[in-house]
Image: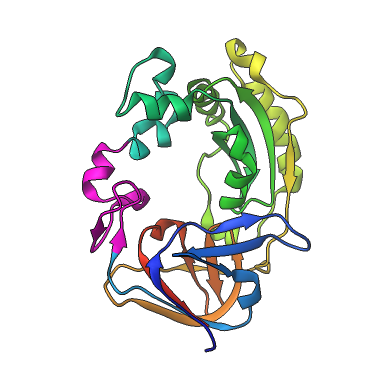
Amino acid sequence: MNFTWAAAPLRKIILSVAEPSVRAFVPIGRHLVDVNTLIGKKIRLNWPGMAECQSCSGIFSSLQAQGLCRKCFFESPMAGQSMVRPELSTAHLGIADRDLDFERALQLQPHSVYLADSGGVKVGVTRTRQQVTRWLDQGASRAQVIAITDNRYEAGLIEVALKEHFSDKTDWRRMLAGETFDADFSAATGVALEAIPSDLKRFAVANGVQHRVHWSLAAGFKAKSVKFSNHGDEIEAVLAGQRGQYLAFTDGRAINLRSHEGLFIGLSC
């Protein structure tokens, strides 16, 4: 191994569209590790047992979901109910969930409702200004905007209606396997536009922004998900490729780095 990046708080993979495939960079402390240059090489990831909360920046031995300590998970607006369920947003009513200023800044801006092909056609909601980032994070090969709303609540209502026809979850195994549904996807956009409730039709976008990308991970990958859960956990294997927030290895293991945000991770290659 020629390079070592000392253990530092991990952040989600930074993704950008480039030919011939998406480029990926893993932020470890102040360093950006170029994932594409590591494909085909043996790398080692290790967790010495420390973690940094993404809200209060406190140091802990472990974190709850979303990279937060236990206290922040139950109190921080970063883990408020509308983060997962946009239809529960209340900032447009001037009603706080946890922090009205934070929630106004997040919720009272244009949001996109989209369909994405990430191992199956799914519906999702994201802030319009970060829609491409969201699609890349989910490992989508194709996506299209179905509606653009004035706020998060309106987008959530449309998503609820569309969930009668589409899942709102990513099937990570099928996504990593590179399964695509091109024919179904084209038909699905028409179904989605028709399914938007009449009182929200004004937000529909018949020819919304489309997105197509190619990933470095070869199709047909059969994944077994692994995670760091015990102090001193380590992964050492040859990197097969990357898709979404996952690193995949030639031995079939795959790790979702976003679900490990805040953990002090060391990387050697």
Instruction: Answer left or right for 211 relative to 71.
Output: right
Q: Compare residues 176 and 82 and report the one nearer the observer.
A: 82
Taking the view exactly as shown, the residue that stands out farthest to the bottom is 1
Residue at 23% x, 60% y is: 60
Instruction: Answer left or right for 110 relative to 235.
Output: right
Taking the view exactly as shown, the residue that stands out farthest to the front is 30
Which of the 4 image quadrants contains residue 215? Answer: bottom right
Which of the 4 image quadrants contains residue 73? Answer: top left
Residue 47 vertical placement versus 2 (above, below): above
Magenta span contains residue 96 = no
Q: Compare residues 139 and 46 and report the one nearer the observer.
A: 46
Magenta span contains residue 67 = yes
Q: Compare residues 130 and 8 and report the one nearer the observer.
A: 8
Could you tell me if residue 163 is visible in this image? Answer: yes
Residue at 47% x, 64% y is: 30
Could you tell me if residue 177 is visible in this image? Answer: no
Instruction: Answer left or right for 106 relative to 201.
Output: left
Residue at 54% x, 34% y is: 125
Color theme of the render: rainbow
**Image location of residue 185, percent across then percent down:** 71, 41
**Image location of residue 201, percent across then percent down:** 65, 15
**Image location of residue 160, percent across then percent down:** 50, 27
**Image location of residue 100, percent across then percent down:** 35, 24
Q: How many marks?
A: 0
Residue 107 vertical placement versus 6 (above, below): above
Q: What residue range appears in magenta? A: 51-76
Instruction: Answer left or right for 265 relative to 201.
Output: left
